[in-house]
Amino acid sequence: MPALLRRGLETLIRPYPALEVTSIGPEGDPAAAGVSTADVDAIWGAAVAAYDSGLYPALALCLRRRGKVILDRAIGHARGNGPADAADVRKVPARHDGLYCMFSASKMVTAMLVHLLDERHQIHLDDPVAHYIPEFGKKGKHRITLRHVLTHRAGIPRIPPEFADPNLLGRPAEILGLLCEQAPVWRPGRRLGYHALTGGYVLGAVIERVTGKDVQTFLQDEISRPLGLGHFGFGVAPARLRDVAENAFTGPPVVPPLAGFIKRALSVGFSDAVRISNDPRFLHAVIPAGNICTSASDAARFMQLLLDGGTLGGVRVFEPRTIARAIAEQSYLELDLTLGAPIRYGAGFLLGSHVTSPFGLGTPKAFGHLGFTNVFVWADPERDLAAALMTTGKPALSPGLASLWWLLSTIARRVPRDGRRHIGA
């Protein structure tokens, strides 16, 4: 038996060291969702093994199968459990309903707001961005379309150095001005390169120009309030700052060439990015590509909305065809020039595959997004699964990451495929 598997099984039978490190939300009967109790236990065992790796001070996992919650738990501490924290610092237990930052998984939410406007014929994805933001068309950017931005082909992946200043995050008009003055690094549509933050600001500005509402208000009006999501929005109000789980840089130091790829994508080093992620200026700002704060449960509910063809709890938000277009393949394992790896993209989504999937082995129909490397929010139509894995540990590269891979693979292996979902059919 592999050592990692044995370790995961051992965690299932040992008593937890203290009840305060585990929080369990409402969970239904797994059998009613076509999953056995043994399957759920194996998945949670793999989650505890990931926590035991020491890379994740807090971990929250919510799984919905056939629309029913089969697992909604958290382990660890939202604060005080990082490797740099003193032994006597107060530890705040992680909660299943606590708030976590989704980071880049926010991109698919902003993308769906754009797709909603396309559904309503208020915009068209193949229109130039400059049609809605005329000043954006400078320096050769007049050819960039909304689709280019959604599929990371706009040619503006590099973040201006000024973006590294947290004081700028609360001034979206200045950020848009910087982007308008930026020249593309390649002809739009020609190459693939992950746009970590730039694309989100462009799409957010288009939403505001078209609707007259800022992207935060539009999200609340169209998705969060109609679905009754407890907290599902960009950043948090000052009063809720301490409710967001704190991130920690874990694992060994980041060295080249990985350090170069990360700085190219984020404009700052990895440890600096972790520090900024806990900065109140980051958490109070509206960052369309990177700072939705929510619980694992509400993130999974959003994916359930997409899995169910745009309707949840009797509330329709999207037409099924809108979702089908959003998750349709736009690039097949093409080399991403920002990340230096082959990636499958939809129009705002990362897509799974049989082997190189971010959502576990054998997940070719899965769609969703990663957030700051260790947050995973996805749906898998073949398994009728909507899932959210929130973690606060930020290891760039570590042998312990094998435990996270094992968790994702255990979910894919233990939740059976039944092929029941055909989005847009």
Image (spheres, grey):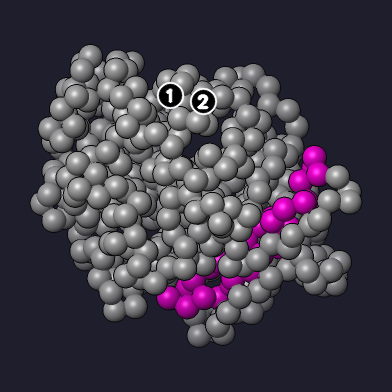
Would residue 100 be visible to someone looking at this image? no
Q: Nearer the viewer, residue 244 or 310?
A: 244
Looking at the rendered image, the disc whose residue lies closer to the viewer, 1 or 2, is 2
Query: Taking 286 as reference, is 155 left or right?
Result: left
Local SS, label 2: helix
Helix, strand or loop for the magenta stretch, by majority: strand
Pinpoint residue 19: horizontal percent, then vertical percent. 80, 72
Asked whether the beta carbons under mark 1 and mark 2 sit within 8 Å of each other, the answer is: yes
Label 2 crowd (10 A; few <14 / some 14-19 / many >=20): some
Residue found 22% across the figure and 21% down from its top:
141
Pinpoint residue 307: horizontal percent, then vertical percent. 35, 65
Residue found 47% across the figure and 78% down from its top:
68
Local SS, label 1: loop
Pinpoint residue 109: horizontal percent, then vertical percent. 36, 52
User: Which region is colored magenta?
Assistant: 58-85
Judging by the rendered image, the residue that carries numbered circle 1 is 159
Vertical side of 36 occupied by 415: above or below: above
Image quadrant in which you'd find residue 22: bottom right
Q: Is residue 177 magenta?
A: no
Query: Taking 28 as reference, is 300 left or right?
Result: left
Residue type marked 1: Ile
Q: CA distance from mark 1 to mark 2?
A: 8 Å
Label 1 crowd (10 A; few <14 / some 14-19 / many >=20): many
Judging by the rendered image, the residue that carries numbered circle 2 is 164
The mark nearer the N terminus, 1 or 2, is: 1
Pinpoint residue 222: horizontal percent, then vertical percent. 28, 62
